[in-house]
Amino acid sequence: MALELRQQLKLTQQLVMTPQLQQAIKLLQLSTLELAEAVQQEIEQNPLLEEETISPDGDHEPLPEETLGEPQPHEEPAPLLERTAEVSLDDNAGLKEIDWSDYENEYETSSSFKERDSGDLPSRLDILTKKTTLEDHLLWQLKFNDLTPKEEEVGMFILGNLTKDGFLEVSDEEIVTATQSEPATVQRVLAMVQDMDPSGVGARNLKECLLLQLTHLSLSDSTASRIVRDHMHFLEIKNYGAIAKATRLPIKEVLEAVTVITGLNPHPGRAFSDDESHFITPDVYVYKLDDEYVIQLNDDGLPRLKISKFYRDILKDQTGLSAEAVSETKGYIQEKLRSAMWLIKSIQQRQRTIYKVVESLVKFQNEFFEKGPTRLKPLILRDVADDIGMHESTVSRVTTNKYVHTPQGIYELKYFFNSSISRYDGEEAMASESIKVKMRQMIQEENPEKPFSDLLLSEKFAEEGIKIARRTVAKYREQLGILPTKFRKKPKLPKA
């Protein structure tokens, strides 16, 4: 077969993602807080973008309609510079009048970043300092011991290999190899660490952790220590009768020891976890007024943008500049003007799209807004996309990392999309999330001595006409964080 070169023409169609389109898609999937940060970055990079200041009475000038062409001849040129009053740093009379003790309440109430309801938010003093980590807390205690340089090295290695729960992940042999120390030195330093606060830190498993805590409570020879040391497997399944039989102790004494054990901390390092609480700011608010639901977008903290008047005036007044300078200046400003106008239009389009999606969700899930999660209906992205005349990918981006405040609470927009569970009686299918709510209610109302198995829960759903398999019940139970039947069962104690 001979090889040859050919030239041919081929006509194809393809979607080209312009930078402006990529920016619009990126803005669409950002939350309100992320959008505010992205807009602030654009303000810093684009000199034509300015944040519009709002007067105390709430009135502000509307955003003027800008064009990319030449300025109209009838427009009056505005001054190029708007001077502000000079401030003297030597005059501190005004500073003396400020009550700094009440600064937060009196002088920051007008901030555009003020939350709607800050009653549940943390104090500003709570975020001024870094939270103490478990390693810092243990290192502070380690410094109080009179250690040699080698012992300090071993101690630092041990602290660096603790999990966030306070458990040690390496063996003695690995510590000896890594620090090139003697086994006796490693054991001595490890004993120091295990004697520190919080009690139980430095253990390699749960049994050792509980035994360390019992030792710190001077209960190393107690019934509780004996149960943890020799009958941990019975303790895990709450078989207290088997423990009483194996230890030949009265059931009352076993229960008292179990009470002591359950009061211990299986995760001693959790108290020093650096995981911070994340407060959710809703992107949309849905209120019920009379018999209708009103949708309000959350614009708090989102800067109002406008085109800089200073640079618009430069396009009008170009006297005293050469033709080359005029062309270069005009090209630069018009490029930035296009970018600024596209950003403003993209944000406006984003807000309109979010409003349409939430409006469609309120229509489809009206019973949820009225009666709660048990009345949630099956819904997919295609349903909302067809309703508002947009693509599924657009709806998916809009509902990502967005939260809505409803009369039933705060929910992620993704929460309203659920798979359907069919019914035997031919009635309307149910949403998987409503099935989970009903399952939680069933388990909360079950007899603790005879908890429902996954098969029994499946049969109870079938009695209500809901078709759900046992494996699906087990999957939903695990997603809800509910333990299996044997761990929920109340221990049956032998008669005295």
Image: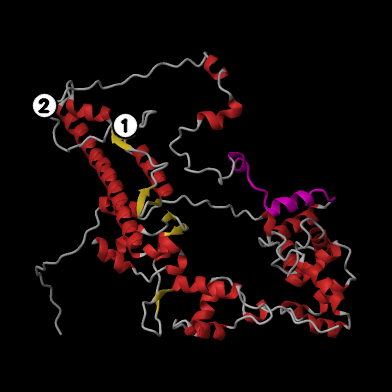
The structure residue drawn at horizontal position 75% and vertical position 70%, both measured from the top left corner, is 173
Residue 410 drawn above or below residue 183: above
Q: Nearer the viewer, residue 294 or 262?
A: 294
Q: Mark 2 or 1 closer to N-term?
A: 1
On whether residue 476 falls in the magenta region, the answer is no
144 falls in the magenta region: yes
Q: Residue at x 82, y 76 (%)?
A: 227
Considering the image in quadrants, where does the N terminus appear? Answer: bottom left
Q: Nearer the viewer, residue 311 or 221?
A: 221
User: Which image quarter is the C terminus in?
Assistant: bottom right
Seen in the image, is 418 located left or right of residue 478?
A: left
Q: Amino acid at mark 2?
A: Pro
Q: Which residue is mark 1?
A: 60
Horizontal side, residue 55 vs residue 463: left or right: left
Secondary structure found at label 1: loop
Query: Label 1 is placed on what type of residue?
Result: His
| Frontmost residue, 337 versus 253 | 253
The vertical placement of 121 against 65, above or below, is below
Q: Is residue 193 above or below residue 88?
A: below
Residue 90 drawn at (x, y percent): 52, 14
Reply above or below: 150 against 381: above
Q: Which residues are magenta?
A: 124-146
Determine which residue is flagged by label 2.
73
Q: Residue furthest front?
A: 290
| Residue at the image position 11 percent from the left and 68 percent from the top | 10
User: Percent from the top left, x then y, of residue 355?
Assistant: 32, 53
Q: Residues within 10 Å of mark 2 (few under 14, many from 20)?
A: few
388 or 140: which is nearer to us? 388
